[in-house]
Image: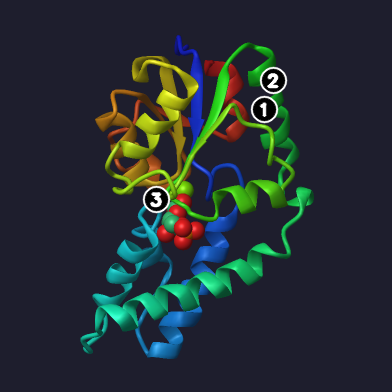
Amino acid sequence: MKFDKKAVIFDLDGVICFTDKFHYQAWKALADRLGIYFDEKINNRLRGVSRMASLEIILERSDKEYSQEEKEAFAEEKNNLYRDLLKNMSPSDLTDEVKDTLIELRRRGYKLSIGSSSKNTKFILGQIGLGDFFDAIADGTDITRSKPDPEVFLVAAKKLGMDPADCAVVEDAKAGIEAAKAGGMTALALFGDAKDCGLEDYDLASFGDLLTIL
Ligand code: BG6
Ligand code: MG
């Protein structure tokens, strides 16, 4: 199958790099401190959704009620743990497969953007050596509604000057696939959760598989 698109919008965490593991570790440390059960399966529900929405999902397992102030402190605590893990990232955390595929897509004339709910997007891109690479970045600082709302992808398309119908989105999260479809874009699923949701247009065998369909 081939898709006739002009632009590709990439999710960041779990697609361009494996920061999804660090999100898990940081949330797990917070949940353990609060005595709340948390595992990889619950973590999959956090993919693509905002920091505060992620916290609310974790607190579903708590028998205590927390004030808004306490919740904000928890979110900040998690973000500090997460940022400590990000500090150790370097360009060696960008795989050759992702790097080579991005360079080849650009050579083929595609406009390339990030569409991520994360407010740490620009920091992470800098860490892995992609600070200046993308034609546009839409992230958690540009939006008021996180995935599954299409806002972040619509902002990315707008920044690229593209019609949503000309954009393909690459996602590892069910919420991200839903957001891409709600935005009128083609949804390409990479990895389990996105592939299992049944709403995607295509299942990618690997990141490099983009070169066979675009
Ligand atoms: C998404 C992640 O990319 O960003 C979510 O998949 C995360 O798990 C969200 O909650 C917000 O990230 P941050 O870095 O702003 O806390
Ligand atoms: Mg993701």
Identified by mark 2, the residue type is Glu
Identified by mark 3, the residue type is Gly
* Res. 196 image quadrant: top left
Where residue 161 appears, as percent x and y from the top left, is 45, 18
Where residue 46 appears, as percent x and y from the top left, is 37, 60
Q: CA distance from mark 3 to mark 1?
A: 23 Å
Relative height, residue 47 to residue 32 (above, below): above
Q: Residue at x 66, y 28 (%)?
A: 102
Q: In this rendered view, identify the residue nearer to me: 182 or 188.
A: 182
Q: Which mark is residue 101?
A: 1
Q: In the rendered view of the protein, which quadrant contains the C terminus?
A: top right
Query: Does mark 1 have its CB less than 8 Å from ligand 2?
Result: no
Identified by mark 1, the residue type is Thr
Disc 2: which residue? 104
Q: Secondary structure at mark 2?
A: helix
Crowdedness near tag 3: few (<14), some (14–19) or many (≥20) residues, C-alpha within 10 Å? many
Relative height, residue 118 to residue 154 (above, below): below
- Sequence-earlier tag: 3 or 2: 3
Query: Does mark 3 have its CB less than 8 Å from ligand 1?
Result: yes
Disc 3: which residue? 48
Q: Residue at x 56, y 62 (%)?
A: 21
Residues at circles 2 and 1 in contact by the CB criterion of under 8 Å: yes
Q: Which mark is residue 135?
A: none
Where residue 169 appears, as percent x and y from the top left, is 44, 30
